[in-house]
Image (tube, helix red, strand yellow):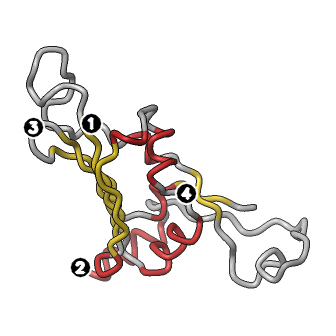
Amino acid sequence: MKTKRLVELAKTIRSKNAGTDKITFDIIFREKKNYELIKKSKVLTKQSMAKLFSIPKERISDFVEFDPAYAVKFTIRRTHPSGSPGETDVFGCQQYPPLLDLEIPVETKGSSTARGGKRSSHRVGRLRSPTSRTTLSKRRKRR
């Protein structure tokens, strides 16, 4: 099955303080289809986040899928209060990188796997990079 990294689907992935003893994570999507894809895949769950961050599930105090904002938010309890001796990220803003490379299964429209058949062996055209000529010219036109 084809996959995409979470960083390719989300508009914003961040972590930040939520008081002195918690860090909150926000994953926000621009398009509803990407948000629904994440929800359907069940890759982002309380259990999977505990495993990803190598923490007990009980340290995750909140886990919310917030449909009006196309966002997933979860909060973890710190082991040490912000700014205390031994604490390494006072602002909580350096905790999100493990989320970036999460592999999300995707189904492409019209693919044989989406219809329940076997995957064909033909190559699909390569994706353009964000800095390709076409993308840059589109950005210039929007300005």
Left or right of 19? Residue 140 is right
Q: Is residue 97 left or right of residue 44?
A: left
Image quadrant assignment for residue 50: top left
The label number, if any, that marks residue 94 in the structure image = 1
Q: Could you tell me residue 123's position as x and y percent?
A: 82, 65
Q: Earlier in the sequence, mark 3 or mark 1?
A: 3
- The reply to whether callout 4 and callout 3 are in contact (CB within 8 Å) is no
Marks 3, 1: nearer the viewer: 3
Give the label, 2 or 1, closer to the camera.
1
Q: Return the residue found at the far front.
A: 58
Q: CA distance from mark 1 to mark 4?
A: 21 Å
Q: Would you name the residue on which mark 4 appears?
A: 43
Q: Element type at marker 4?
A: loop
Q: Nearer the viewer, residue 85 or 109?
A: 85
Q: Residues within 10 Å of mark 1 (few under 14, many from 20)?
A: few
Among the two numbered marks 4 and 3 on one chain, the one whose residue lies closer to the N terminus = 3
Residue at the spot 89% in from the left edge and 77% down from the top edge: 117
> Is residue 141 placed above or below 27 in the rendered structure?
below
Q: Split into 4 quadrants, where in the image is the N terminus?
A: bottom right
Q: Nearer the viewer, residue 86 or 125?
A: 86
